[in-house]
Image (cartoon, rainbow, N blue to C red):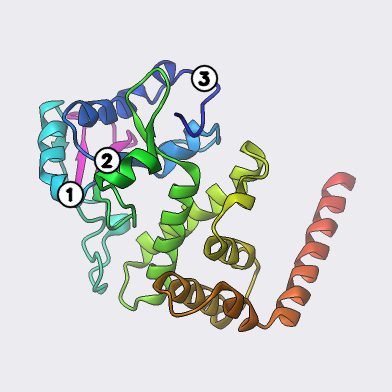
């Protein structure tokens, strides 16, 4: 059963030449799912797909590459944007494979095959059936919304806490997280209430304009909850809530002032 539906048929979208590649992987029984911009656009977000990211089960990455090459794509070096040679994690950019169509425009979207473990997605057979789905009218495989949000939270937490992480990729994860967590309530009211307690803890606090050390504490607490060494209740107790509530009130006041200024203007 589909976790979400787009208002327009995917096959009639301008991005079908990219999205149909998921069908090609599905036909070869390659465990994967669509990620990043393409998830948001299918949720009717106005974002443009700059690159199709396909999270692929680590052990099937080479098979996925073979399928892409059979479809006429060719490998190319990673964008300089994501190359960070002084990083110890992903210094050469996204792990996996980057591909493009031959003779494509410089601005044309390409394809990135990324190990699912890097996206913090469990694409084992058991998880695949409950955490992903085939979109109606196609065989494109998408993640369920809460599964995808959980994976982004894990990616943000790990890239924030681990020293030496590729900063450009870490920034990309944070951007995707913010896009999704701000869009979901408009697209699916009440869905964030269905989050597991550890993710709700993160979502409730991470969007607040906190000092770096406090934001790091949010990430660390969420990681420790996942590891089972900290309860959600104790995670909340460890946070300086009076300070955080004051920051939230100031942020809300500034937002109201900006709205009034925009209305007057």
* Residue that numbered label 1 is attached to: 77
Determine whether label 3 and label 1 are within 8 Å by CB: no
Q: Is residue 51 visible?
A: no
**Looking at the image, which is closer to me, 248 or 198?**
198
Disc number lying in front (3 or 2): 2
Q: Earlier in the sequence, mark 3 or mark 1?
A: 3
Q: Secondary structure at mark 2?
A: strand
Q: Is residue 28 visible?
A: yes
Q: Quadrant of residue 229?
A: bottom left
Picture quarter with the N terminus? top left
* Residue that numbered label 2 is attached to: 32
Neighbour class for label 1 at 10 Å: few (<14), some, many (≥20)?
A: few
| Magenta highlight range | 97-113
Task: Verify whether residue 230 appears in magenta.
Answer: no
* Residue that numbered label 3 is attached to: 8
Q: Looking at the picture, how far across and down is residue 216, in whole percent?
A: 51, 78
Q: Secondary structure at mark 1?
A: loop
> CA gap, disc 3 to disc 2?
23 Å
Neighbour class for label 2 at 10 Å: few (<14), some, many (≥20)?
A: many
> CA gap, disc 3 to disc 1?
34 Å
Task: Verify whether residue 112 appears in magenta.
Answer: yes
Neighbour class for label 3 at 10 Å: few (<14), some, many (≥20)?
A: few
Q: Looking at the picture, how far across and down is residue 46, in whole percent?
A: 55, 35
Q: Quadrant of residue 39?
A: top left
């Amino acid at each position: 059963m589909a976790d979400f539906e787009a208002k327009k048929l995917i096959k009639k979208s301008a991005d079908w030449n990219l999205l149909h590649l998921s069908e090609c992987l599905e036909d070869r029984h390659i465990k994967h799912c669509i990620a990043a911009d393409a998830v948001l656009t299918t949720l009717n977000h106005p974002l443009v797909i700059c690159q199709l990211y396909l999270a692929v089960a680590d052990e099937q990455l080479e098979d996925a590459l073979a399928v892409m090459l059979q479809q006429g794509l060719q490998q190319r070096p990673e964008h300089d944007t994501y190359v960070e040679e002084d990083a110890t994690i992903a210094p050469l950019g996204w792990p996996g494979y980057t591909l493009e169509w031959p003779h494509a425009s410089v601005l044309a979207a390409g394809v990135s095959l990324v190990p699912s473990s890097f996206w913090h997605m469990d694409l084992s057979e058991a998880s695949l059936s409950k955490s992903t789905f085939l979109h109606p009218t196609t065989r494109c495989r998408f993640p369920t919304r809460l599964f995808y949000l959980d994976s982004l939270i894990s990616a943000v937490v790990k890239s924030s806490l681990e020293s030496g992480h590729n900063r450009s990729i870490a920034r990309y994860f944070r951007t995707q997280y913010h896009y999704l967590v701000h869009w979901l309530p408009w697209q699916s009211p009440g869905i964030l209430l269905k989050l597991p307690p550890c993710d709700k803890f993160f979502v409730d606090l991470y969007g607040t304009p906190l000092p770096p050390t406090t934001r790091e504490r949010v990430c660390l607490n969420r990681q420790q909850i996942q590891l089972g060494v900290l309860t959600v209740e104790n995670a909340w107790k460890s946070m300086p809530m009076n300070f955080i509530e004051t920051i939230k009130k100031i942020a809300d006041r500034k937002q109201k002032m900006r709205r009034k200024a925009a209305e007057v203007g």
